[in-house]
Image (tube, helix red, strand yellow):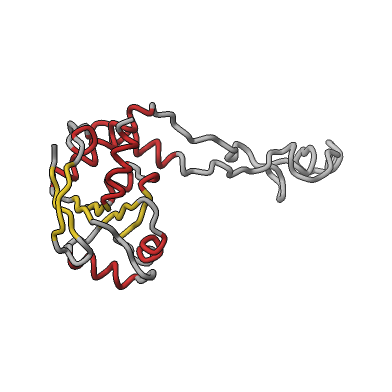
Amino acid sequence: MPNLDVFDLGRKKVGSIELSDLVFGAESRPHLYHQVVRAQLLSRRAGTVKTKKRDEVSGSTRKVYRQKGTGRARHGDSRSPIFRRGGAVFGPMPKDWDVKVPKKVKRAALVSALSDRVREGHVWVLEAADLEQAKTKRIAELMARFEVGSVLFVDVDNRNLSLSCRNLPTAKYLSSRGLNLFDVLKYDHLILTKGAVEAIEGALTT
């Protein structure tokens, strides 16, 4: 079982915690990362872009002028794609970009990423992350104290911590319920509270 020190916000050691082998000591499976991250990014695409076809634009279906005798090219109605305000040809249409990935694969990939971060020594555990008020400066100082340049903060529910991270480009806050593979891989370090560790282990071992 991985065993990590527990610190307070001043980086003073206040205890230790045993992590579950099933979540933080699992086998590394990097071959799953691409599949899960690709599905996660595709699910963010709205797929709502649309252009109007010839039969959807406004305009008359009347032939613009007679077929013969004008000396000009033959034309049908004004909704033809060759006219201004005519319909689009082969334009984009609404599409569902979602790719289905089995829950077991998502779980295995996330567990693998968490375990990799522990093996790399890039996981810190805090006794608690109680901030009196939302203040970006406090988080910047905390990152400097723990010597982390890119970090994902995870707590069970911490509004002040969430607001404090918003203006920092290399820091992000997530609730333990929203922990996902993309953000674990994106940020070099993880700073978890003891409450978050318990919540993550409870969610990933049931």
Total numbered badges shown on the rendered structure: 0
Q: Please tell me which residue lies in front, 91 or 36.
A: 36
The image shows residue 161, relative to residue 113, as above or below, that is: below
Q: Which x, y percent locates residue 180?
A: 35, 43
* Residue at x-position 38% and y-position 69%: 134
Q: Please tell me which residue lies in front, 20 or 100.
A: 20
* Residue at x-position 36% and y-position 50%: 156
- Location of the C terminus (image quadrant): top left
Q: Is residue 68 left or right of residue 54?
A: right
* Residue at x-position 69% and y-position 42%: 87
Q: Please tell me which residue lies in front, 100 or 10.
A: 10
Q: Which x, y percent locates residue 170?
A: 29, 61
* Residue at x-position 41% and y-position 60%: 159
Q: Which x, y percent locates residue 103?
A: 38, 29
Q: Quadrant of residue 105?
A: top left
- Location of the N terminus (image quadrant): top left
Q: Which x, y percent locates residue 89?
A: 63, 38
The image shows residue 183, relative to residue 146, as above or below, that is: above
Q: Please tell me which residue lies in front, 68 or 75.
A: 75
